[in-house]
């Protein structure tokens, strides 16, 4: 039990207590040229040997910054910025190392492609921490070395390594913030996910650290993940925990709380003149299948995308097949983008493909409903007579109707709602995919739609809801037009349902008003297709019979 308590104190309590105190200005280093894949600006601290902040200089804070001709360093995307310093080492109380590595003056020197920190404890032990830039891997290799110069110390030295915490900007999303911590084991083990704790308390991650594939933090578009470079480094891990990090400086209302993983590890104290080393890769970059495919290990970080594409919906209900549909749609979108060179056009083409493939089925259902309506029109006089005959005996009327329906085989086509049931998984899959689709970030479509990952702000209102977004209003207008073109059913229940349906577009439009314009572009295109399709069906089959009931409109 004492060892367990030591580990808990080491991993959960100590990092929160040893915050930065009296630290000087960070030393700024650039890795790679701005605009090159995997290039960074990093502020290092000599007092902690850690990262104070990190910018990805191949990404930009905003669309305005990306379009800025006179670009400044402030235009680059800030990924890491917290007071605890990423990749900062802490050691347990009573350790053999003679100095506190979390609050000591490290020696810092430039090396080829990186920086090296050195800390001697004046008792014969030396700690080295090397950051080596790996542009193809979009990050760094961090090597920790414990050298024994002249110490007689023996045993193991326990440390904890504070992982990076990503800046997590607020976003408009029906699913809320998507900042999580993740720990993925090697093989088919269970992936652990931890959201920021409401009360900011630390959380243990129940995963075998010695079987760790990677662990780290993510926000809507980006991830910061640490992974062992070899088996010896993996075996050095002892425990993982998740800390909740408040918004930047604790007061920034534009950001959400985020997470960071604290990695417990143990280094063997080497014999004199020898050293012990562990090495970890650290990824700072986008979450995207297309980006992951360019990494040395393309499948390493895919579990985080599996999580992003499997969100709960409607109060915690998981969408069956939602992840598979989202993956398929993202793959098709990527293929269309490679062909067209515009993500907006790719979405339109995908919509046309999906709705076009559904047209034969929808036409068949419309035809079946019209046939049913014609049959109901012939039987309606008899049904009205029965209703009048049994006006004072509801139970007898129900029994008579059951017998009547059985005699005349009155049953609506079973597939009348099939088109909507088939398109809903596609709609929900696309909704899910666009929730965290990095590939659409700061990607223009046309005119005022200059970022498909945000709402299509035509102009600023100066009051809530801040911007005038045209696409959701256009979709509402098209949906209302579609419902008004459908005749009201003669059946009272269906008539009441369709009357209610005429108000649903307003509710959906309000819910999706600030959602990504990519989704609204799909919905508007789909509704335009529905209007054209209904005109074609009407011309071929004639007007819809109100006795046939209504056929839901695919979105």
Image: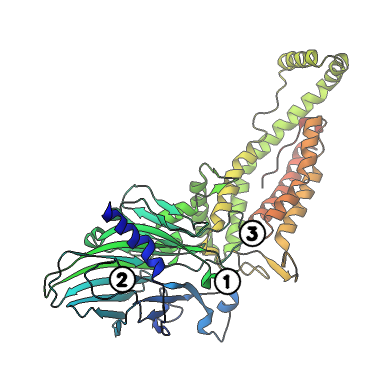
Please name the residue that numbered disc 3 is placed on: 515
Give residue 141's mark: 2
In terms of depth relative to the viewer, which is nearer, 38 or 308?
308
What's the CA distance linking mark 2 and mark 3?
Answer: 37 Å
Residue that lies at the very extreme toward the bottom in this rendered image: 70
Q: Residue at x 71, y 58 (%)?
A: 472
Please name the residue that numbered disc 1 is placed on: 252
- Is residue 460 shown above or below 265? below
Report helix, strand or loop for mark 2: strand
Please give left or right for residue 481 compared with residue 229 in the image. Answer: right
For label 2, the crowd category at 10 Å Cα-Cα, with few meaning under 14, some 14 to 19 and many 20 or more, is: many
In terms of depth relative to the viewer, which is nearer, 17 or 415?
17
Report helix, strand or loop for mark 1: loop
What's the CA distance linking mark 1 and mark 2?
Answer: 31 Å
Residue 196, x across and y down, in percent: 49, 58
- Is residue 393 shown above or below 359? above
Report helix, strand or loop for mark 3: loop
Please give left or right for residue 389 compared with residue 100 in the image. Answer: right
- Nearer to us of marks 1 and 2 is 1
Please give left or right for residue 17 compared with residue 277 in the image. Answer: right
Residue 45, x across and y down, in percent: 38, 80
Residue 162, x across and y down, in percent: 37, 67
């Amino acid at each position: 039990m004492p060892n367990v308590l030591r580990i808990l104190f080491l991993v959960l309590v100590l990092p929160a207590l040893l915050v930065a105190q009296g630290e000087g200005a960070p030393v700024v280093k650039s890795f790679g040229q701005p605009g090159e894949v995997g290039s960074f600006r990093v502020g290092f601290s000599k007092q902690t040997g850690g990262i104070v902040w990190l910018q990805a200089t191949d990404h930009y804070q905003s669309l305005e910054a990306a379009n800025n001709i006179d670009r400044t360093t402030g235009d680059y995307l800030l990924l890491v910025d917290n007071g605890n310093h990423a990749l900062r080492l802490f050691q347990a109380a009573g350790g053999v190392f003679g100095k506190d590595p979390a609050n000591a003056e490290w020696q810092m020197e430039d090396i080829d492609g990186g920086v090296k920190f050195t800390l001697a404890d004046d008792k014969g032990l030396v700690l080295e921490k090397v950051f080596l830039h790996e542009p193809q891997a979009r990050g760094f290799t961090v090597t920790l070395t414990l050298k024994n110069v002249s110490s007689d110390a023996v045993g193991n030295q326990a440390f904890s390594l504070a992982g990076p915490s990503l800046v997590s900007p607020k976003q408009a999303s029906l699913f809320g913030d998507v900042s999580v911590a993740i720990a993925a084991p090697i093989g088919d083990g269970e992936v652990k996910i931890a959201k920021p704790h409401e009360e900011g308390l630390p959380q243990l991650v129940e995963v075998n650290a010695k079987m760790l594939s990677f662990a780290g933090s993510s926000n809507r578009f980006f991830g910061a993940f640490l992974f062992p470079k070899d088996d010896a480094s993996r075996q050095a891990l002892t425990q993982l925990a998740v800390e909740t990090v408040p918004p930047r400086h604790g007061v920034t209302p534009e950001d959400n709380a985020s997470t960071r993983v604290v990695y417990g590890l143990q280094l063997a104290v080497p014999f004199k003149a020898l050293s012990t080393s562990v090495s970890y890769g650290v990824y700072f970059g986008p979450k995207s299948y297309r980006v992951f495919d360019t990494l040395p290990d393309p499948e390493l970080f895919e579990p985080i995308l599996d999580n992003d594409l499997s969100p709960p919906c409607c109060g915690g209900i998981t969408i069956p097949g939602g992840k598979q549909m989202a993956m398929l749609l993202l793959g098709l979108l990527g293929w269309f983008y490679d062909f067209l060179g515009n993500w907006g056009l790719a979405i339109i083409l995908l919509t046309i493909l999906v709705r076009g493939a559904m047209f034969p089925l929808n036409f068949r259902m419309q035809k079946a409903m019209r046939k049913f309506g014609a049959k109901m029109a012939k039987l309606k006089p008899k049904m009205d007579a029965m209703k009048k005959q049994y006006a004072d005996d509801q139970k007898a009327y129900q029994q008579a109707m059951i017998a009547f329906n059985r005699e005349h085989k009155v049953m609506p086509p079973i597939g009348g709602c099939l088109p909507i049931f088939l398109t809903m998984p596609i709609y929900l899959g696309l909704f899910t995919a666009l929730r965290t689709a990095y590939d659409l970030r700061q990607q223009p479509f046309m005119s005022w739609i200059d970022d498909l990952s945000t709402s299509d702000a035509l102009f600023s209102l100066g009051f809530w809801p801040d911007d005038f977004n045209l696409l959701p209003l256009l979709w509402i207008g098209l949906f209302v037009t579609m419902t008004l073109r459908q005749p009201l059913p003669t059946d009272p229940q269906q008539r009441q349902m369709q009357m209610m349906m005429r108000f649903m577009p307003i509710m959906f439009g309000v819910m999706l008003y600030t959602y990504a314009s990519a989704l609204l572009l799909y919905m508007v295109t789909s509704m335009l297709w529905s209007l054209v399709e209904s005109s074609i069906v009407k011309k071929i089959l004639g007007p819809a019979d109100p006795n046939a009931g209504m056929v839901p409109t695919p979105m």
